[in-house]
Image: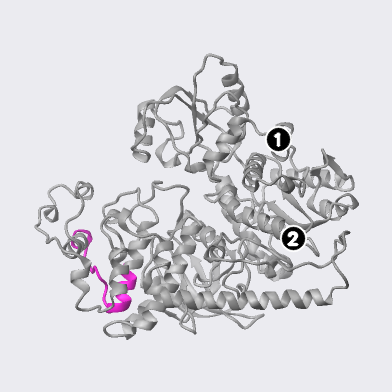
Amino acid sequence: MERYVVEKVIGEGTYGVVYKAIEKSTKEQVAIKKFKFLGDDTLSKRELQACSMLNHPNIVTFRYSFRIDGYLHLVFDYAPSTLSKLIAKSKGGIQPVQARTIAFQLTKAIHCCHQNHIIHRDIKPENVLLDEAGNVKLCDFGVARSIQYEGEGLSDYVATRWYRPPEQELRCTNYSYNADIWSLGCVVCELFTGKPVFRGDNQLDQLKRIQEMLGPLPQALIAKLPKGSSISKGSYPTTSLRCTLKDILPIEEAIDFLEKTIAMDPKKRMSSKSALNHPLFSKLRQVDLNEEEAQKRRRHRHHEDIEEEIDGVKSEEYDLEGSGPSFYDMKYDGEEDECKSSHKVSAKKSNSQHAPSGRKHGSFKDGGEDIQEIIESDYFDNNTHNRRRMSIHSSVASENTAYDDDFEDYDSEKYEEEYEEAEEIEEMVDDVPMFIANRVYLGSIDAAANTPALKTKDIRFVISLLLPEEHLEVPGINHLRIAMDDSTDEPLFMKLPYVLQELEKFLTTEQGNVLVHCMAGRSRSASVVIAWLMVSQQLGMDSAYNRVLMSRPWIDPNPHFKQELDLFGQCIRGSLTPATQELLKMSGVILPRLHFHESFVSSIHDNKKTSTIRLVSDIEKDSNSDLQYICCYSIACAVTNRPAPFALLQITKVTTIQVGQLDDQHATSDGFASIQELRDVLKSFYPDMTNESQCLFIEYVAY
């Protein structure tokens, strides 16, 4: 804490305390959140992960993190007020114009979360900060969850009661983004009226008040009520929110918005995207569009100014140190861009509301690179199949020696030895420009960016898929850096839409080639290969294959390295097997969204380190098998992105492959007790499953 002057405590709860402080070097006000517990860091890691992913003008800016005596501290931009304080000062509700603006900004923040597959789960006025200009800053992601598909089981009792939907109140676990939409409606209603819409004293009173305003609970929720509960026997009017609010809220658009958010049936609540497009915000959307157009004109003038300074037309030869459009000057259209997953953490966000996230450009400071390392260190520490310790190294520690002691040492001697050995291998091969079929470069990224062999390739755009601890700068080239975080709830697949968008944009609007640098070694290699298969399928342009090169380091060579290169070769030649094409077609980029099927040919429960390659080989040899579907489950990780999907791509005789993943909370360390138990769990996720297709269930272990 030597770099801060702590002024006072501004908040305290069960899990942490928040201080207002001044950063000595910049004199800026910050908020420092210190977590109270050393043992279970679940909430702190969850908030750290969520904050590091989100970059939006209406979400509180996360700067960096550090530890002191083992306690995790998160540093945010400071905001002087909260929505709850504003509502308390405004008797009878906030002025309609201001209420619309705050509601619009809060909806944009929630939309950003949902686009990044995050449910906030605790949206309430106390968690909506207001900066000096009165702009919304959504905060407190301690109970936020990343979900991979609709219906994924979640913990039930997290949101504050008054803003909690009935399905959460009744401890259901199959809620989704629509839980946040209910909370949004409750907050917006309070903005306009000045009072909480459902102010229950306890769980049963809360449900009673909801029914008094919206009518009786659906039968499915009534069945969840405690036995003998009086509220299940009560006679509630068949009423509506409109009838209740029409006399106190004379704004038709607001009433319609609340009807479509505070709906008893979760399926009838509108999505965050629909909420943004609601007539309540029509004028505010137009203001945003006008600002976008103004930004485009400014960018266009900036490009013209640059072109005037360039002598002649672009040369066919490319100088690595030459210029080109700045990454921040690239063109971005539409609301989708401002909400994409962000792994850039800096002291200041871009002024452009539509500047794309997920990138690191130029120098990177303030310690952001420790974010995913802290998350991954604890994940691997508890994973018996992926023992690995991540070391906490950040540019904060390197630039401020007095700050070094603030970070816990997560190193293990074994990992240090492995990493040093890998670096030695890198140094030996960096000077050797080695290519596979003139397409795949083997060597470190520094060598890839600077060897004469690659300089002749006219590389003008670099995409690096790296481990969080890696720091990379490629001078003079536009650079998109994506943290290859396949060890948490946010796998590489979730970031692919954004990567594809930027790649396609470059290939269709710019000249020159693209270098994609992938982290090799361990199970991450499989994720990269599958990702690139998807990239090639999505692009669908023959010319694109000739402009995209791949580089990968020599760190920790993989035993299946040759198979991966062969598969990548299929990708760039466009000669994918029918089974691979079918898998890619069905996957929709995100594998865990595929469905399961109930019938099983066999069940493999093997706690040994079974190679999925061998399993696939056995399947291939079984000429009599009429197998159509494959369902994978792993007790080693929460997302199907480890070796099994890679191995399954090689099955040529299975015309339709379904790859899926179950949440680990539904299985013990020994797997499922019986096939029937597994079927019951699958049924709870997918009630419409049939027995028409035969499916092989594989419980595999990541190598």
Q: CA distance from mark 1 to mark 2?
A: 26 Å
Which secondary structure lies at badge 1? helix
**Residue 689, position as x, y percentages in the image:** 37, 33
Side (left or right) of 380 relative to 322: left
In the image, the segment drawn in magenta is 186-205
Image-quadrant location for residue 65: bottom right
The local crowd at label 1, few if under 14, some if 14 to 19, many if 20 or more residues have their Cα within 10 Å, is: some
Evaluate whether residue 140 shows in this view: no
**How is the protein colored in the picture?**
one colour
Q: Which residue is mark 2?
A: 510
The local crowd at label 2, few if under 14, some if 14 to 19, many if 20 or more residues have their Cα within 10 Å, is: few
Assess whether residue 446 is covered by the magenta stretch.
Answer: no
Image-quadrant location for residue 561: top right
Q: Residue at x 56, y 16 (%)?
A: 622
**Residue 26, position as x, y percentages in the image:** 65, 81
Label number found at residue 7: none
Q: Residue at x 50, y 67 (%)?
A: 34
Report the quarter where the N terminus lies: bottom right
Callout count: 2
The residue under label 2 is which amino acid type?
Glu
Report the quarter where the C terminus lies: top right
Q: Residue at x 77, y 78 (%)?
A: 305
Q: Is residue 587 above or below residue 446?
A: above
Label number found at residue 570: 1
Dot placed on the residue nearer the N-terminal end, 1 or 2: 2
**Residue 475, position as x, y percentages in the image:** 80, 64
Image-quadrant location for residue 574: top right
**Residue 214, position as x, y percentages in the image:** 20, 62
Side (left or right) of 218 relative to 506: left
Q: Is residue 668 above or below residue 284?
A: above
Along the line of sight, the residue nearer the viewer: 577 or 31: 577
The residue under label 1 is which amino acid type?
Gln
